[in-house]
Image: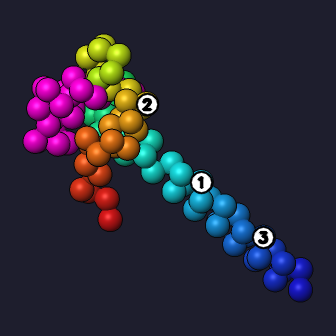
Amino acid sequence: MTKFIAILIGMGALANSAVAQSSMTMAESVVELDANGDGVMTIDEMMAAYPEMTADQFSQLDTNGDGALDDAEMVAGQEQGLIPAPASEG
Ligand SMILES: [Ca+2]
Ligand SMILES: [Ca+2]
């Protein structure tokens, strides 16, 4: 009986981590694109992931104009449909 409860708790923990993961999906996709791991996407990294990305599109996404896309700019771009979902998933 104790073992059964332990299994239930274990499954609950698994379910919780699955929920946590799904809410992290967007941040993870940013990390995947960030080739040099500096936490922001340059136009080179964006064009490597999205060959159809143009400089115009990039500057549209780079709302603070620092020449790189941070997490917030990536999320905003994805929400606006300016950045397609990564094709490598699934
Ligand atoms: Ca980078
Ligand atoms: Ca920026």
Q: Mark 1 points at which residue?
A: 20
Residue 26 in view (yes/no) = yes
Among the 4 quarters of the image, the one containing residue 53: top left
Q: Which kind of residue does numbered mark 2 sit on? A: Ala
Among the 4 quarters of the image, the one containing residue 38: top left
Q: Report the residue that reaches farthest toward the top.
A: 66
Q: Which kind of residue does numbered mark 1 sit on? A: Ala
Label annotation for residue 9: 3
Find the magenta span and give its range. Answer: 39-61
N-terminal of the two: label 3 or label 2? 3
Above or below, 19 relative to 41: below
Q: Where is residue 49 in the image (x, y as percent from the top left)?
A: 20, 42
Q: Which residue is drawn at 64% across and 66% down?
A: 14
N-terminal of the two: label 1 or label 3? 3
The residue carrying pointer 1 sits among few (fewer than 14), some (14 to 19) or many (20 or more) residues within 10 Å by Cα, namely few
Disc 1 is placed on an element classified as helix
Q: Quadrant of the N terminus?
A: bottom right
